[in-house]
Image (spheres, helix red, strand yellow):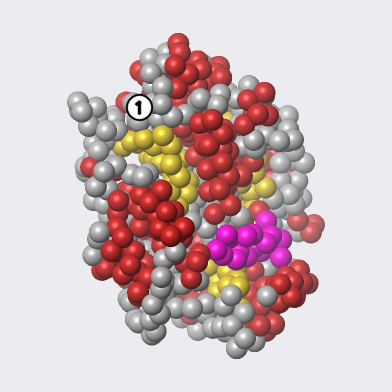
Amino acid sequence: MLSVKENSPVEFSPELLTKFGEIVKRYPEGKQKSALLPLLHEVQAVFGWLSPDAMDKVAYFLNIKPIEVYEVATFYTMYFLEKKGKYNLEVCRTGPCCLVGAEKIMHHIEQTLGVREGEVTPDGLFSWRGVECLAACGYGPVLQIGPEYTFYENLTEQSVDSLIETLKNKA
Amino acid sequence: MGRTLLLTHINVPGIQGFEVYRQTGGYRSVEKALKTMSPDDVVEEVKKSGLRGRGGAGFPTGMKWSFLAKPEGVARYLVCNADESEPGTFKDRYLMTHIPHALIEGMIVSSFALGAKTSYIYVRGEMMPQIRILEKAIAEAKNAGFLGDNILGTGYSLEIYVQPGGGAYICGEETALLESLEGKRGNPRIKPPFPAVAGLYGCPTVVNNVESIAATVPIINDGGEEYAKIGIERSTGTKLISAGGNVKRPGVYEIELGVPVEEFIYSDEYCGGIANGKKLKAVVAGGSSVPILPANLILKTASGAPRLMTYESLADGGFQTGTMMGSGGFIAFDEDQCVVRNTWNFTRFYRHESCGQCSPCREGTGWMEKILYKIEHGLGTQSDIDLLWDVQKNIEGNTICPLGDAAAWPVAAAIRHFRDEFEWHIQNPSESQTRNFGLAHYADPLVQTVD
Ligand SMILES: Cc1cc2nc3c(=O)[nH]c(=O)nc-3n(C[C@H](O)[C@H](O)[C@H](O)COP(=O)(O)O)c2cc1C
Ligand code: SF4
């Protein structure tokens, strides 16, 4: 369900609109709605989440109804309908990763960041959540960070600590 | 060493790029197919090879291709299923990361066979790095004249596009995938019509797994009959198995179909045994959806024959004592792992991933998760086990798509083979609550461990 907690008006840059145009060309005439998922990824990569205004503008660009965008944005887990931390740590929580310690890693991240799943740290830098199988079961526990979905494998509490440290210093 | 067809050159430096891939014999199948064969010849070779779909269902690929409707003036599509989300499965990611051109080459040959002029590779959205790799490989192939207009001067033209998903397991189901590719929610379609008649944009469409498509390359290079010589009976060729869980050497292995399960687990060529000197307790052999088997039944069939890595042998005994090849996601559990906890985890996964169209799946997965949570956390009663059995039975076979079955089977198998572990949780509530994460501090009396 789409629950609008906040809205923020967005402006799509000419570069972004050019990219949109390129993507739409992948599909036959009249089937531009196929571009919806890729476009939402592009928008989220720029703004960090999908505000209602951003979704409406995507609908306008694709010449479809806003509800068609909301439907999709609420169905798929990768789209954020609210702001996340600058670094959103997504840890695999499915069976195979749990066999090799994913639950411990999530617990450790929760303790270290001091926020619960889905919450953002007060400085806005971090948030985290458990996600379903990332098709990396042989390298578990694993986590990913968007928008490029960089992958961190064979996690230990130590490697999580140093990752968080590195990201803090980068920010 | 077993024979390999897909991963032969995996360790050659630079194999991810076009030049090196080409030097190792890459794109020969495109030259051969487009210049010396008709589309029907290609379909015929794939039929002869006996190749069975590597996405999970094991349907013969050549036969699937021959069902494709070919009305005049209507576009036909090949869509590659690279959604890879079945827990335990990570072979397609491996192939696309390390030898992306093997998939692109297979896409060209397969598209030619089907008469597709536009093809899509639907990759799960989380695999953004792999999407970039594939896009680069497509650009390289196009640059070298293997894609685009009038390929190699043969008059055949093809474009391949990569489509990202949005993070939803259900989009691996082929009709949900097509809905998603059309820019909609991933709700599976009611069949018929099948995609071969009305698929993408209502046009005839073939959906194939990454590995199935890559396998067409050696089939065209060496001929379908050569391919069929590898393997046993109706399990021909090689198969990528992704091994995870508590094995010593997790990873992706290409096996000749027919390797004994025992060899696969214990030989140093493959998994190298169970990690940390532990004993094997159970195996989920083909991704989270297939029935879990205790160690004794995965190593030997009920009749005492060694169990082999083939479609037939893994299924020997039906669901009473057997399992399925599935997607090749091989998950090993050591003696410390808790079957109840894992079943709860998998059920939570299916509840989360149910698209919600069918009541038995939508409601049933939620009920099963709740009951399993209770049992796992020491709040269960004896009658919960029967209730759980009842719920799973009422999901199976009563839904639009097979996700309902996929959610029911693991629960049924866990109760069938590990009932006393469920009972233990109910009889020892305090211990089941104070346990460490994921650990069961008792040995399962059912399991015959192997040294
Ligand atoms: C819930 C569900 C998830 C599936 N996920 C995948 C998947 O991630 N990858 C895949 O290739 N097939 C998946 N399949 C199987 C596809 O529906 C389809 O059978 C397959 O892509 C056909 O390709 P193949 O014949 O080459 O195996 C899934 C099926 C179901 C019911
Ligand atoms: S079985 Fe489940 S996932 Fe499949 S269509 Fe029905 S509700 Fe959706």
Q: Is residue B323 visible?
A: no
Looking at the image, which is closer to me, B2 or B315? B2
Picture coordinates of residue B446 (x, y %)? Answer: 61, 60
Picture coordinates of residue A4 (x, y %)? Answer: 35, 82
* Residue B289 falls within the magenta-colored stretch: no
Q: Is residue A54 visible?
A: yes
Q: Which residue is mark 1?
A: B114
**Which quadrant would residue B433 be assigned to in this image?**
bottom right
Q: Is residue B274 left or right of residue B148?
A: right
Residue at image location 66% in from the left, 78% down from the top: A109
Q: Is residue B414 left or right of residue B26?
A: left
Q: Is residue B440 above or below residue B289?
A: below
Looking at the image, which is closer to me, B375 or B264? B264
Which quarter of the image is occupied by the N terminus of chain B? top right
Which residue range is magenta in the image?
A139-155
* Residue A142 falls within the magenta-colored stretch: yes
